[in-house]
Image (cartoon, grey):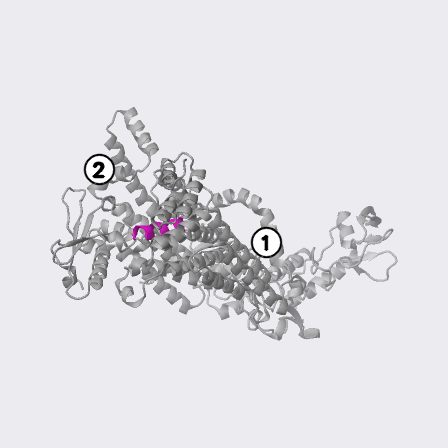
Amino acid sequence: MQSIELNVDGRSVRVRRGATLLDAARAAGADVPHLCHVPGLPSRAVCRMCLVEVEGSARPVAACHVAAQGGMAVRTDGDGLAAIRRAVVEMALAEHGGPCGRDGCEVDALARDYGVMDAPWTPPPARPGFDRSSDYIAVLPAPCVHCDRCIRACGDRDVIRRTGWGTGVSMGFRGEGALDDAGCTGCGDCVAVCPAGVLRSLSDVVRDERRLAAASVAAPAPALSASSAAAPPLPVAADDDEGPGAPAAPAGAGDAGSGRKRFANVFIAAVVAMQVLLPLRYYVSDDEFDERFSWRMFSPIRMIDCSVSWATGPERTPVDARDHVHDVWISLMKRARVDVVEGFARFLCQRQGGNAQVYVDLTCPHPDGQARRPIPADLNLCEVRP
Amino acid sequence: MNMLAERWDRFWHQNDVLRVRLTTFRVVFFGLLAFDMWMLMVPRAPRYGVNGFNVSHLPFLDGLLPVPTQALVTLLYLVGGFLALRVALGIATRRSLQALTFIYGGVYFWSQADSYQHHYLISLVLLICWFLPHEFLHGVDEGHAMPTLTHVRSWAARLIYVEISVVYFYTALTKTTKFWMNGWAVDKIIQTDSMRGFLSFCTGSLGLEESVAYAFTAHTIMLWQYFVAFAFLVPRLRPLACLSGPIFHGLVEVIDLKIGWFSWYMIGLYYILLFPDRWFLAIGRPIGRLLAPFARLFEWLVRARPIEGGAAIMAAVAAGLVSAALVEAFVPVAGASVTAGVLGALVAFAAWPRADKPVPRPLLRAGLQVAGVAAMVVSLRGSDALFDYHRFWGGDLSRRGDLHGAVAHYEIANAVTSGPARHFQLAELYEQLGRTDDARRAWLEGLAREPDSERGRRGLARVGVAP
């Protein structure tokens, strides 16, 4: 790969051909601040934060955008540049609506670095409120500084766009509607690059709401005011599973609205009640062999095999059940599954037609030594259980 | 009252779960279920509706539903397995899951022909899984949604824990009978000599009666199940449970209770559900490194530019046709053509572009579904599933005197396996039907696979060939 050599702040550095002045500055160990630039995304040079002076150039140039050339002499520092950057940060902070106080806000961080936190700023014009149309991403356009990072991160998906002109410029979405209507797949790339907290994961927003509620803040912080209006703050986080300070989680299915929550509560109650109560059927019914819904895995009753023999007609002609049904049913009869025995009796009765007689000799040993006969042997099942 | 409501709300509605844990649960549980349905449940399909007889689990269903048929149950199991795989991959997740629940639970409640309680448990878990936050998990449809997200909130995940806890509690509670406590039942259920030998060795070394070992084992199992019931609810108890659980369920496999893959489900669930976050991630890290190339490939596929319009329609049609052709060509089961058609339609429909709402990654959806159908074919052909399916069916028909039907199934059973098969049974059926030449060929084929068989030699002599 071809490389070029240039001078940055008096140091000679060598970078690959096609590298930007920002790359060269980094290679020289110079700290050039930047806001709209994100490595890996195409450069737009819209924030003018990374301006540097190039010998022979009448005006400072954007380091993230201008390609380095061999023999260039670049200055990344100086009073003039510092003044320009301070002005850029003040403008960004004004666009941002002043310091938001959110952890990780890059605009706040720059403002702190340049000592402009207390600079006078004018509240930005009113913009659309909190967009929670997406299941993944919450959008609060107000603090947007128009760095275009999100537009570039979205790339070909083309969901996020700029709308309006001049002072009315704002971030918007394809179709001029809500995020969810613009074909957003919720990939989160825009959230990952947004420096100002405009695009945030719903989970982060929920977490902040919970923290606000926990801290009993009467007036919500500016960055969350719209969200707080859109949805009431959630109760304080539980720490039963992961401990306090667990990362935030988005509300899953059933957690969003009160209607869904009511449904969830009914569903939970129904499933738990069924789970707890249905097995009791085994204890209150008189069929000690039917364990289907009792969670009696490997109970003593299942260790025994009853003997089953069938007969039909007044002469009690023996019937081999295996001639009629699959072996699995016979196994169930041997386990004294009474409804299967009755089902097979019905089956034989129907086959015989009118005045049918079907008898079963079902004898079940028991671990206690007392054999049981769940169905009396002299009972014509076609009469009692037609 | 407010305090109770608050505790309820906190317990159910503020349950934050590691996202990768739920994703792993979905992949492992539904992946296992898919192969379970294909490899273990399909062979049981021939037991349904034999001779028009059926008894359902819920009496009112007998009056409402027709008797299930073998072909229909085969179709439902094959399609159900495919839907389970789709859920594991995150393709049309919720709809696939709903259809799977109706199929799995429906077949279970429709007939007692397969009445393991595990099916009941899995039916309930499937129902609860409808309400997991699938849109936040990793999968084909979700893509790489919210890459920085670590936890998701889910009451359904909590309900799965409660569900398992209740089951463990009852299995322990119902063991408080003298026939369990005195070791009688344990003595009966241990099927393997190795385990019996181990217990004899232990008691012999300590100079105790063997019955003491069984009683001790019975008490230990019962107490452990009580403990696990609480461990699923109390996070602090989980480290101990997730160490002892796999040992317990591993021993269940050792004593050979013939409960299919249930022990493996449970061992998997212990890792996925009970391991504390730190352990879970520590164990998962090397696995993640191993799977990294696949993850990168998946990521690349997810980010690939989606196809649209005519190309997408062609891809959907092609995927459907390939899937149907695979089933038709390689899965000789009752109603194979219908199954092929249904699977082909499912594949094509999931990848079909729609005007109202974009289908996420239609090409990836189509490709992975075809791969899923191929996995089904490989699992059926590469295991004894199809062999068992036809030999069970042939055996049942033979017992009930339908010799022609039995021959047809034994012929397919022998064709789909290369190991010792049912050639001798087939030869005897040929003899009974007077097809001596076919019988001779079957005896010879059987002896080629089992050269030492006395039964084969005698049979061959009977049809006039000196062995």
Which residue lies at the image location 15% right of the left edge and 42% below the top edge? A369
Judging by the rendered image, the residue that carries numbered circle 1 is B298
**Amino acid type shown at disc 2:** Asn
What's the distance in space between the residues labelled 2 and 1, CA to CA? Answer: 55 Å
**Dominant secondary-structure state across the stretch colored magenta:** helix
Q: Nearer the viewer, residue A226 or B361?
A: B361
The 10 Å Cα crowd at callout 1, few under 14, some 14 to 19, many 20 or more, is: some
Q: Which quadrant holds the N terminus of chain B?
A: bottom left
Q: Chain of mark 1?
A: B
Q: Does residue B396 belong to the magenta stretch?
A: yes
| Label 2 vs 1, first from the N-terminus | 2
Secondary element under disc 2, as helix, strand or loop, is: loop
Percent x, y for residue A163? 66, 73
Say which quarter of the image contains residue B405.
bottom left
Which residue lies at the image location 25% right of the left edge and 43% below the top edge? A303
Say which quarter of the image contains residue A234.
bottom left
Left or right position of A347 against B365: left
Percent x, y for residue B382? 48, 47
Tell me, for residue B182, which label it has, or none.
Answer: 2
The answer to whether residue B40 is visible is: no
Instruction: Write down the region rendered in magenta.
Output: B388-400
The answer to whether residue B424 is visible is: yes
**Amino acid type shown at disc 1:** Phe
Q: Which quadrant holds the C terminus of chain B?
A: top left
Residue B311 in the image: above or below residue B15? below
Q: Does residue B450 belong to the magenta stretch?
A: no
Label 2 close to label 1 by CB (< 8 Å): no
Q: Nearer the viewer, residue A384 or B260?
A: A384
